């Protein structure tokens, strides 16, 4: 917990100053963990919504997976998200730090998750489940892709509460000041500071990658006839939709790692998702037409 004496004075610019507590509950000193964080609850909420939707899909005859299979699939999603997100964060954003200290992977209390890494982990989990359930991978992926956006929504809201991954500077009225910490590489001295007014890009991304994409996929899932929709179609649409909305959000987000070819890493990695989404839709539509 930050001592009050360590904090700089709050800016008096007329813009809102972020002062939300990342902890829902703080535990007394000496406990193994500091407390219950909103970020952890965001994952619990995302997985709870996924569990609810899987049950609803089966009840409404939109999914063939019974209660036992739902448990297996949810297990694969949880493990894939947590392990893939953690490993992906260091491989995609802090590979150099990982080489110097591989134990960083295990220090989960220090934070660090990557959505693109989580998607790769979920992909491996779906492959495992499809083989175990002896069903089509594309049938699994079309269902799972509709479960992800609520988790993204909760995660981005948690990013905002944490005051992390904030946006680029702005003079607009919506700009906010966030408290952050920086270390001078020359002296090794660190200090807390308030940012200039910046975009609350976490909220933009929650609305786009989370809420908007969730509404679109739910409408497509419920309003389209499953046996008339090529297997894999929703998967491709999810990849393209998420990537485009992520790229739009990156316009307002301050890059948190070195650029790649002049692009933020979120934008760069999303380009591959667009390519994959277009390829999946094209190939799956072609395969369906050949089999009909």
Image (tube, helix red, strand yellow):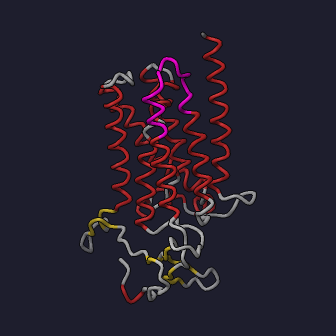
| Residue beneath the point at 45% across and 69% down | 163
Q: Position of residue 7 (x, y in %)?
A: 43, 85
| Residue beneath the point at 56% across and 73% down | 172
| Residue beneath the point at 31% across and 68% down | 34
Is 261 placed above or below 223 here? below
Closest to the observer, 136 or 11 = 11
Q: Position of residue 2 (x, y in %)?
A: 38, 80
Q: Is residue 226 left or right of residue 171?
A: left
Q: Is residue 229 magenta?
A: yes
Closest to the observer, 62 or 15 = 15
Main secondary structure type of the part rendered in magenta:
helix
Residue furthest out toward the left? 28
Q: Position of residue 151 (x, y in %)?
A: 42, 48
Q: Quadrant of residue 102?
A: bottom right
Region in magenta: 216-235
Closest to the observer, 237 or 25 = 237
Is 263 placed above or below 128 here? below
Quadrant in the picture for the C terminus:
top right
| Residue beneath the point at 58% across and 57% down | 249
Tell me how many marks there are: 0
Closest to the observer, 29 or 66 = 66
Q: Position of residue 110 (x, y in %)?
A: 44, 64
Q: Quadrant of residue 16?
A: bottom left
Q: Is residue 32 magenta?
A: no
Q: Quadrant of residue 75?
A: top left
Residue furthest out toward the right? 261
């Amino acid at each position: 917990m930050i001592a009050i004496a360590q904090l700089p004075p709050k800016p008096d610019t007329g813009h809102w100053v972020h002062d939300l507590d990342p902890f829902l509950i703080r535990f007394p000193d000496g406990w193994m963990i500091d407390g219950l964080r909103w970020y952890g609850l965001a994952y619990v909420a995302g997985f709870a919504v996924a569990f609810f939707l899987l049950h609803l899909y089966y009840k409404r005859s939109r999914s063939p997976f019974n209660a036992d299979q739902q448990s297996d699939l949810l297990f694969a999603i949880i493990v894939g998200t947590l392990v893939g997100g953690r490993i992906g964060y260091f491989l995609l954003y802090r590979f150099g730090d990982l080489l110097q200290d591989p134990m960083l992977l295990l220090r989960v209390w220090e934070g660090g998750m990557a959505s693109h890494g989580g998607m790769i982990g979920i992909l491996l989990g779906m492959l495992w489940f499809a083989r175990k359930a002896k069903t089509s991978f594309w049938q699994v992926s079309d269902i799972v892709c509709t479960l992800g956006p609520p988790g993204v929504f909760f995660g981005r809201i948690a990013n905002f509460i944490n005051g992390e991954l904030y946006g680029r500077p702005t003079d607009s009225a919506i700009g906010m000041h966030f408290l952050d910490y920086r270390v001078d590489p020359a002296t090794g001295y660190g200090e807390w500071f308030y940012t200039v007014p910046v975009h609350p890009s976490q909220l933009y991304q929650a609305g786009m990658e989370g809420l908007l994409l969730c509404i679109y996929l739910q409408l497509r899932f419920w309003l389209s006839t499953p046996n008339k929709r090529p297997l894999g179609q929703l998967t491709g649409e999810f990849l393209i939709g998420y990537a485009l909305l992520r790229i739009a959000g990156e316009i307002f987000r301050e890059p948190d790692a070195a650029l790649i070819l002049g692009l933020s890493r979120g934008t760069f990695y999303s380009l591959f998702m667009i390519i994959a989404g277009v390829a999946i839709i094209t190939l799956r539509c072609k395969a369906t037409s050949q089999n009909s």
